[in-house]
Image (cartoon, rainbow, N blue to C red):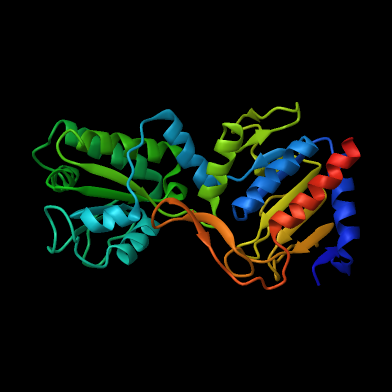
Amino acid sequence: MTAFMNGKPCDLDSALDKAAQMLSGARAPALAGFGADIAGVRAGLRLARAAGAVFDPLTPAFAAELRAKQDRRFMFVTPGEAKSRADLVAAVGDEALRYARALFDSPPALGAGAGKPRALLAIAGSVAPSVKTLAAPAHRVAGVIAALAASVKRPQRTGEAAAFAQALKEARYGVIAFSAGELGALGVEALMELVESLNAATRFSCLPTPHADNAAGAVECALWTTGFPGRISFASGDAEYDPWRFDARRMADAGECDAAVWVSAFRPQAPSWRGAGPTIALTGPGAGFAKPPEVHFAVGKPGVDHPGEFFDDEHRALAAFPAADSGRLSAAAVLDAIALRVERRSA
């Protein structure tokens, strides 16, 4: 089955009509999640504009990363370039360390360190075997990074941070891998200050861990379509940006959202918010909702059930992924069909 209402199978047209009715009658609807390919994101933006809704594709981690990028300069590198050239990698946090160990499993092929063993350092809450680690509990990571930046600018003679800073400065081409979800906005800003300080002595860049479910592609699509990276509202007809007011999770938890559209086509994930009001969900089969959505569409996975264009984390660019059509509906087809019905109601 493709469509459900309150957990019971129904025909597709009835589900589409019900979804359009819910959004047309809502005063503060919100579209969130947006695990979809670029066509799905475009269709979501069309629906948000038609319904006068909030469009929020951001996870808390991506929101923290974007806030830091907006507040400070951001120097970053693609995973492929980092793997080819970096002779030193420092991983900040446990998630970043796992990512770095998987990505940097061979010596660099280019640059001054070509063919030589790559140094791997860590700033983490626990000491990692065979990795030089600067211990930093999660609540102290931002302060430790700021101390490192200070030590890079004004070298200290003794201390663990001084030795760690000196090791970073000795890199010919260094990369700092991090997860914004672990660091938070202040931690990411401190990290950028550290990278700026290191670039006065050598060459350094940031390497964010990948964001799942085409999150980066959704942000890029929102940017070129509206001029904003998401967390926008079309309530006035034009796109209005406010990263706090139009945070769909905050709106749902505060009871401000009276209808929600949740999109998770890459995996069957349910939202973690509370109190979002009636929900229209587009997910892969098997999503574990605490309460069945008022309307639920089982959609295919981009690049598996149908061709799709989405963000390639290896090259930090959009790429097309071919696939044979399995017959499952795409998120784009469902969202476009709902948008058409909402537009007709408005007309």
Q: Say whether residue 89 is left or right of residue 251.
A: left
Residue 170 visible at all: yes
> Looking at the figure, which quarter contains the N terminus?
bottom right
Which residue is at the front of the view, 284 or 341? 341
Q: Is residue 74 left or right of residue 42?
A: left
Give the quarter of the image for residue 347.
top right
Q: Residue at x 73, y 40 (%)?
A: 48
Judging depth in this view, the residue of 262 and 299 nearest the camera is: 299
Q: Is residue 130 above or below residue 215?
A: below
The residue positioned farthest toward the left in the image shown: 157
| Residue 134 spot, x, y in % from top left | 24, 52
Foreground residue among 175 and 93: 175
Horizontal and vertical percent position of residue 282:
73, 58
**In x, y percent, where is residue 335?**
75, 51
Vertical arrangement, residue 298 with respect to residue 196, above or below: below
Q: How many marks?
A: 0
**Side of 130 relative to 37 (left or right):** left
Q: Residue 30 is drawn in which quadrant? A: top right
Residue 134 or residue 17, whichever sits in front: 17
Residue visible at 69% across and 66% down in the picture: 287
Can see residue 252?
no
Residue 4's place in the image compared with 165, above or below, is below
Horizontal and vertical percent for residue 322?
Answer: 55, 66
Residue lying at 17% horizontally and 57% vertically, measured from the top left:
110
